Image: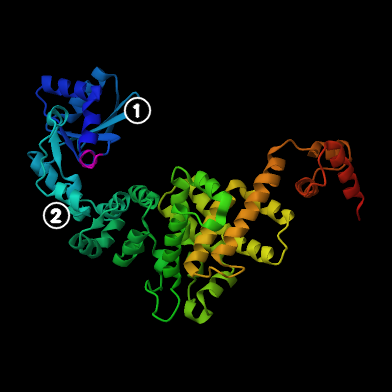
Amino acid sequence: MRQGLSTLQRQPLLRHILTYAHERRIRLYVVGGALRDVYMGRVPHDLDLAMAGDVLGFTRRLADHLGAAYVPLDAERGEVRLVYRKRLAFDFARLRGDDVHEDLRHRDFTINAMACTLEHLLCQSTPEIIDPHGGVQDIQARLIRMVSLFSFHEDPLRLLRAFRFAASLAYAIDPLTLAHVEAVAPRLSQVAVERIHSELFKLFSATHSSAHVVTMARVGLLDVMFPELSAGQSLMRAADGPPSLFGHALDTYEAVEQLINTPLADLGVIADDIVTYLRGGERAALIKCAALMHTSGDLLPGRETASQGPLWECLASSDTAEHTTRVWEQVANRLKLSRQRLEYVAMLLAHRRQPFALAALAAQGGLTPRLVHRWSKELGEDVLGVFTLAIGDAMAYGQCDDPVRGSRALGQCAVTVWDLYRQHIRPVLQGPRLITGNDLQQVFHLSPGPAFKTLLDALEVAQIEGHVHTRSEALQWMERRLKQP
């Protein structure tokens, strides 16, 4: 605790806030996750402060005094955010109930149901923690435990937050809390979808979330958020058979997460490029989301997976990419995701089988720069995201040594494709054009039309293959091309 505490105690702005409140006989409490983080030795990025009385009036005057931005969050509940120089944020709220103990009874989990006066936090080497529900003990036990049986009824979003906290903190969920989640899981449907998708992507962004996603499936939370996933499918695999489509989706989520955390040795020199591509967490979370959704197009009405033969054959032979994308768009629109998130996952789902086709060509010696150019020109660096999803899919199926569809073959294919793109294709695409559409009109007297793209793409391939290097060579190449019957 001392590490996080000492950083806060050296913060001059907090001292100014404390002095301002003290002069007006206002007692401020540090509550919630900020105090949890301090106790864990972390430095909280935002601070939650609670007080009795006129929160709106006090914080407006405090904002003027500090020169901070005043942002009302919920006037009825007395919730305000102050932002100081666009760097530091402080959330103020009115205590619920008559005192701080009553307020803590309305918190979600015990690790967030602690409080400490701002004065004690800043001025004592060992501040007195108000902890009526055993939050400190649960931090030490690395346990997520609801404050009361009414926690989930007061705010059903807490059902999802339990898993998000467990994943981000690497904690376990208390068995009684988990049982209560299962009992009231349908209540999550009452929550605004904007709040749901915010928590969901925080969960997906956690480094080790797959075990918690599987548990969410078991207790019914995934059914509430993604009914398209589990329609008519059994979660558990038969003892002597392959997993269901839903089970395979969960297996793929786990494999993709494993691949993101520890890239395959077969990826060699591009492993660092994948790490760079995924830096920041947003793409990693979206690829996991695509892994969860990638079999949804196979859940067609009236389709019996068992009658289609082995799962892999069902997935590989069915022409369902378009249907999968439509299902995803339906999910994304229902959750009110941004257009950017929707389109990125849609791109992954639309192209997820292409790496298998390229690996099959590579096994036959038919993987040419022309084919890679056509695909990578459309995707650019997103080929790394598509290969990450495809390799995770193969890892989940377990065909590691298959020369066409195994994760090893896909990893080697990814290295070949990325090397062609990085060394030969990208320099051509990003460099100046040797011939433009204007040249086709003025030099070769062609009329604009669809043929322009075909000709210019063919010239790019000739550059990539090393047949053309200069504008003069490009003009000669184009002249020969136009003379061909």
Chief SS of the magenta region: helix
Left or right of 357 in this view: 199: left
Does 353 lie within the magenta span?
Answer: no
Residue at point 9% right, 23% down?
25
Q: From the viewer's perspective, is residue 227 above or below residue 170?
A: below
Which residue occupies the foreground of this view, 255 or 18? Answer: 255
Q: Amino acid at mark 2?
A: Ser
Kind of element beneath mark 2: loop
In which quadrant will I find the C terminus?
bottom right
Instruction: Estimate the x, y position of residue 357 in percent, counting from the top left.
Output: 64, 64
Q: CA distance from mark 2 to mark 1?
A: 35 Å
Instruction: Estimate the x, y position of residue 302 in percent, counting from the top left.
Output: 48, 76
Q: Amino acid at mark 1?
A: Arg
What residue did someone put label 1 on?
Answer: 87
Instruction: Estimate the x, y position of residue 347 in percent, counting from the top left.
Output: 56, 53
In which quadrant will I find the N terminus?
top left
Q: From the viewer's perspective, is residue 477 above or below residue 265?
A: above
Whether residue 108 can be seen here: no
Instruction: Estimate the x, y position of residue 170 in percent, counting from the top left.
Output: 29, 52
Residue 421 numbered mark, or none: none
Q: Residue furthest left?
A: 98
Residue 354, by quadrant, is bottom right
Q: From the viewer's perspective, is residue 117 above or below residue 419?
A: above
Residue segment shown in magenta:
36-41
What residue did someone put label 2 on?
Answer: 148
Residue 123, by quadrant, is top left
